[in-house]
Amino acid sequence: MSSFASDNPLINDDLKPTTDAQRHWKASDYAALWVGMVVCVPTYTMASSMLDQGFTWQMAIWLVFLANCIVLIPMILLGRTGTRYGIPFPVLARASFGVKGANLPAVLRGLVACGWFSINCYFGALALHGFFNVVGMGLAGPAPGEFISTSQLVCFYLFWAVHIYYIWNGVESIRKLEVVAAPLMILASLALVVWAFMSVPSGKLLDLPAKVVEGGPKTWAALTGLVGFWATLALNIPDFTRFAKNNREQVVGQAVGLPIPMALFSMVGIIGFSVSQILYGKAQLFPDGLLTQMGTFASALGLIVILLANLTTNVAANLVSPSYDFSNLAPDKISFRTGGLIAAVIGLLFMPWRLLATSGGYLFSWLGGYGTLLGAIAGILLADFYLVRKGALKVDDLYRRNGAYEYSGGWNIQAVIAFALGVLPCLPGYLVVSGVLDKASVNASLVGLFDFGWFFSLAVAGAYYFATAKRS
């Protein structure tokens, strides 16, 4: 019986390799996809958080650019698997983790995406709430001791509901949204920069003294967090590159669309953070805070653009992956649509207003924490595809039991061990950074190891997997 038979529990129409007719994405589509994902509130907040953590604006921009050049490497390498075989990330993971074991990295990646989905819904809710206030509705913010007000929570649920349309209409509707939205968001960003330079002399705007923080800025921890920012897409980029006309299209599109736009839009976050401090006496981590402070018609339009920016990022970066990932759990029962709906519901369970209460919690605990988790998975996938299998996969066996990727009951125990070895040594440092453990109770070297989390977990997991993998 063919591996692609309709009664095969390991496959559905969304997980099948793409056909030639489906492979029509060009470099411009990937560049637009990235610009649409890059120009978003999390990118803006990432840069403003670095200023709040004691970095100069020059150092912040350099680290953002460097981090995205680093993460671009696994992005392009894993993207090649999509263009070559037309398979999504959870199916690719079956080659190294096993046809059942692939559920482990798929679910972990899906849960991280659910967290990001919730964060972007929160940013969108703040923008919607700010828009209502700019037009005179007078909605209340959080009371002292609260993280979110009732009206902000209502806005959160409203913005969440908009995403269901794009889940229902699939990946192609997302591509069309990005192509239209990306130019609008670039224009809005330029308008904000022009306004800032017109309102504040340029020398003063970029000459704020670096904030003094205890122990100084944490360069390696910040770089790890910045790499972790797109460690999510570095894993599931095959979900998109499987639609490419050829490998060159995804390579060029990603190289053009990621590092430089990330650095440029981070500059927008830095300018916004600085101008809010200079003009209004309070530095704002989030752009909705600055635009609400302005209280003009132009700021109302800016808040609408923020809504659009968060929508494009959220549907592309945070709903496509978990849609495939949760579908992989039971392909014969869970479609792309159903997987996306599951992800959206799980996203409601996160409380991003608590996570984003401090810049350190966002930059180190969230970005650094899940970056370490996903770095180990990326190391295993890269070692398996390029070093063990030399780029050769048996596609039919990815969709059937008792084939080349059955291992032991569908699980490759060595991949699970490799993952654990990459992640567990970083756990004590993460618990210290997130405030669960006191720093004095954990060995200093283990605390410091978390600063290198993504790099450590990728290298250790990849090396162990390569050393123990059976050559076929």
Image: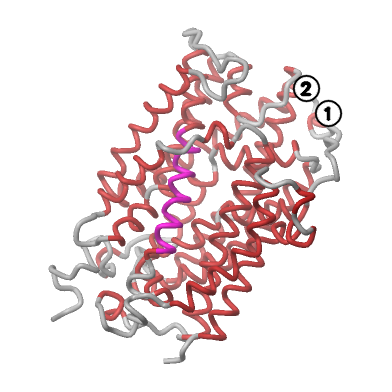
Q: Which residue is mark 2?
A: 278
Between 356 and 387, the residue placed more toward the observer is 356
Picture coordinates of residue 250, whole percent (x, y): 46, 64
Picture coordinates of residue 165, whole percent (x, y): 28, 38
Identify the element where label 2 is drawn.
Answer: helix
Instruction: Specify whether 337 is left or right of 360.
Output: left
In the image, the segment drawn in magenta is 104-121
Q: Nearer the viewer, mark 1 or mark 2?
A: 2
Of all residues, the one furthest to the front in this rendering is 441
Tally of marks:
2
The residue type indicated by label 2 comes to Ile
Q: Are marks 1 and 2 in contact (CB under 8 Å)?
A: yes
Picture coordinates of residue 427, whole percent (x, y): 63, 58
Which mark, by number, is residue 204? Answer: 1
Residue found 33% across the figure and 83% down from its top: 394
Q: Earlier in the sequence, mark 1 or mark 2?
A: 1
For the N terminus, the image quarter is bottom left
Binning the other alpha carbons within 10 Å of mark 2 as few (below 14), some (14 to 19) or many (20 upward) gives: some
Residue found 79% across the figure and 43% down from its top: 55
The residue type indicated by label 1 comes to Lys
What secondary structure prevails in the magenta region? helix
Could you say which quadrant of the image residue 429 lies in? Answer: bottom right
Instruction: Specify whether 84 is left or right of 419.
Output: left
Q: Is residue 276 magenta?
A: no
